[in-house]
Image: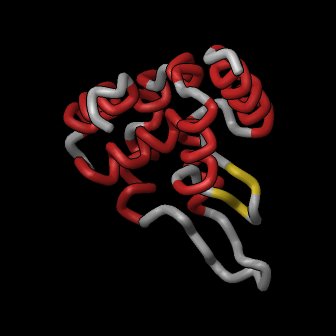
Amino acid sequence: LHPDNGRLAARIAVTNLHKKTEAKFSDTISKLYHYKGLNGENASLIADDVFEIIQKHKERLDEAIDYKRDWDYDFFGYKTLEKSYLLKVRGEITERPQQMIMRVAVGIHKEDIEAALQTYDMISQKWFT
């Protein structure tokens, strides 16, 4: 197999994911926060404090995300994210890779938005593995 096949497969997978998910980070977080279980009970996938911080700074966080970086993964990397890291609602992936990275960055730094944005930028550019 040609090495570019993995990249092509990943790009197709990411394109399909982008068609099925919210384009704005804050909208995705809201969907994950307001998630209800099968019996209608609250089953939020986002902590209260993280949700409040994201809502407070949503314009800035939404602007900072560079979705072009979602296409930097090869197929194996993308499938690993899909299987183990991207949050799902009723079995369907609900967030994009860049949204997951921003969610984690805000979860780490909380109200320190500058640090969260710097961490997002470094992780999304693969400074860390």
- Figure check: 117 above or below 92: above
Q: Position of residue 106 (x, y in %)?
A: 33, 46
Left or right: residue 125 versus residue 55 is left
- Figure check: 111 above or below 114: below
Left or right: residue 78 versus residue 123 is right
Q: Residue at x 75, y 62 (%)?
A: 91
Q: Position of residue 19 (x, y in %)?
A: 79, 31
In front of the other: 80 or 105: 80
In front of the other: 71 or 111: 71
Q: Residue at x 32, y 26 (%)?
A: 121
Quarter of the view holding residue 60: top left
Q: Quadrant of the N terminus?
A: top right
Q: Position of residue 95 (x, y in %)?
A: 61, 44
Q: Residue at x 42, y 23 (%)?
A: 64
In front of the other: 67 or 72: 72
In front of the other: 33 or 100: 100
Please state the total of marks drawn on the protein image.
Answer: 0
- Figure check: 66 above or below 104: above
Furthest toward the front, the residue is 1
Quarter of the view holding residue 67: top right
Q: Residue at x 57, y 50 (%)?
A: 86
Q: Quadrant of the C terminus?
A: top left
Q: Position of residue 26 (x, y in %)?
A: 54, 41
Q: How is the image coloured?
A: secondary structure
